[in-house]
Amino acid sequence: MENQSNPQPDPQPNAGWLKSVLSKLKQNLHLAIIISLTSLCATITVAFWNNYKQDQRMENSRAQQEVQRERDRLERLFESGKRRGRDFEDKKKYEEAVNVYQKAQKEITRATMPESWAELQYLQGCALLKHALAIKGPVRARLLDDAVIAFDEALTVYTRKNFREGWADTRQWLGRARVIQAETSNGPKRNDLLDQAIQAFRNAEETYTGHSRDWANTQSWLGRAWVNQAEMSDSQTRDGLLDQAVQAFRQAAEAYTERSQDWAATQYWLGRAWVNQADTSDKTNDDNLPGRAERALIRALEVYTREEFPQDWAHVQFWLGRAFLKQALAVENPERSRLLDKAEQAFRKALEVRARRDWPEDWAMTQNHLGETLRHQAMASEDEPRVRLLKEAIHCFEISLDIYTEKNFPSRHKDTQENLSQTLRLLTEAEGK
């Protein structure tokens, strides 16, 4: 019979092994907790970061919206300022227009909106120049200086490279201001201002397309600058300058609409240029420069009425008188007497506007030419009418010398003194008969 062995009991767990297992479980639990906490922190961090970025995007969006609202407000202010300023200019309320442009510039600065700021400077300069053209005296000089400053400021933004059209427009109007300044200056300063003006017009001319209105304006003002240069130059230089001026005026006139103000101004300056050519030109009488001048000046009077443009009307009347006088001296009686009468009438009309108090230099110049006309009338008369006309001529020369002093106008003072001396001799001869 086989012996059956009794089953052996399981050996008792080793204490070291158990501790090892427990230690590993504890470590794993710590690791799990750390992992869980790390994951939780990462989740929280990502959530906070996403919320932060969303808040930043919302903040940036609000800031951008605020910037855009401010820009829109300034744009509306800019457009409103331009519109109101131009409305005042159309009504010839230039001072009010300047105030509007200056007020807009308190908020529209070069730093915030440089291009709009430059345009406001340009518009302010234009309004100042138009105001200056409507008046005379010390205030006019100040307005012209302010206009030049405004144009120079605009040109700090309007460069030829980046704003070609704005640069050309500003250069042209700067040239206009320099011409007007030159017309109220003497000596080297006058020459310098005219040189600056011509350079500005040349710059603008390079930008404008042929026969556009801007191009025509540039030609007309360029011609005006040349006439001013010619009137203070020697005969050789004078002829060349006047030839250039006449060509510029003719080109401008072709581009203008007939009977517009620009067209009338060009006709006036064209007539003035022809009178100046007639004074010193070697051209023959067949060219009939005084006759051309007369016709151009009469065309200008189609627009320049005394009621609407009194100063321009007076300027035209003065140069028309000179044209009649030049024609009269080239013919014999009875045509001479007729033309001398027309010259006298034109000068007297000019004096209706050219008051001594308001326009002293223009008044003196007109008195001087009226005296010359009366003297020629006297020489075509006999006996008592001759004496009366010579006395009237002497009076004209004497009162013009009140303005044409030797200190302030040495050349004109000398010419007027010669006219006076000649007329006094003629009066002595007439009274001795």
Image (cartoon, rainbow, N blue to C red):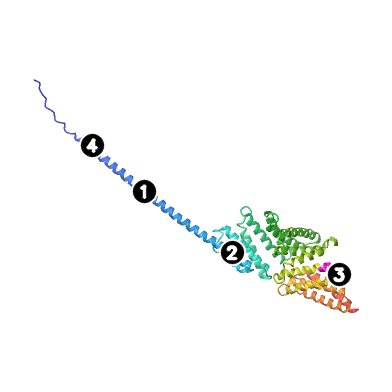
Q: Position of residue 218 (x, y in %)?
A: 70, 59
* Residue identifier under label 3: 335
Q: Nearer the viewer, mark 4 or mark 3?
A: 3
- Can residue 231 be seen here? The reply is no
* Residue identifier under label 1: 45
Amino acid type of the residue tagged 1 in the rendering: Thr
Q: Which residues are magenta?
A: 324-329
Q: Main secondary structure of the magenta part?
A: helix
* Residue identifier under label 4: 21
Q: Are marks 4 and 1 in contact (CB under 8 Å)?
A: no
Q: CA distance from mark 2 to mark 3?
A: 55 Å
Quadrant for the C terminus, please: bottom right
Left or right placement of residue 295 versus residue 141 in this view: right
Q: CA distance from mark 4 to mark 1?
A: 36 Å
Q: CA distance from mark 4 to mark 3?
A: 142 Å
Tag 1 or tag 2, which sits nearer the N-term?
1
Q: Nearer the viewer, mark 4 or mark 1?
A: 1
Which residue occupies the foreground of this view, 93 or 200? 93
Left or right placement of residue 283 versus residue 229 in this view: right
Crowdedness of circle 2 by 10 Å Cα count: few (<14), some, many (20+)? some
Quadrant for the N terminus, please: top left
Tag 3 or tag 2, which sits nearer the N-term?
2
In terms of secondary structure, where does tag 4 sit? helix
Amino acid type of the residue tagged 4 in the rendering: Val
Which residue occupies the foreground of this view, 62 or 30? 62
Magenta run includes residue 371: no
Tag 1 or tag 3, which sits nearer the N-term?
1
* Residue identifier under label 2: 83
Q: Position of residue 204 (x, y in %)?
A: 68, 56
In terms of secondary structure, where does tag 2 sit? helix
Amino acid type of the residue tagged 3 in the rendering: Glu
Q: Quarter of the image holding residue 35? A: top left
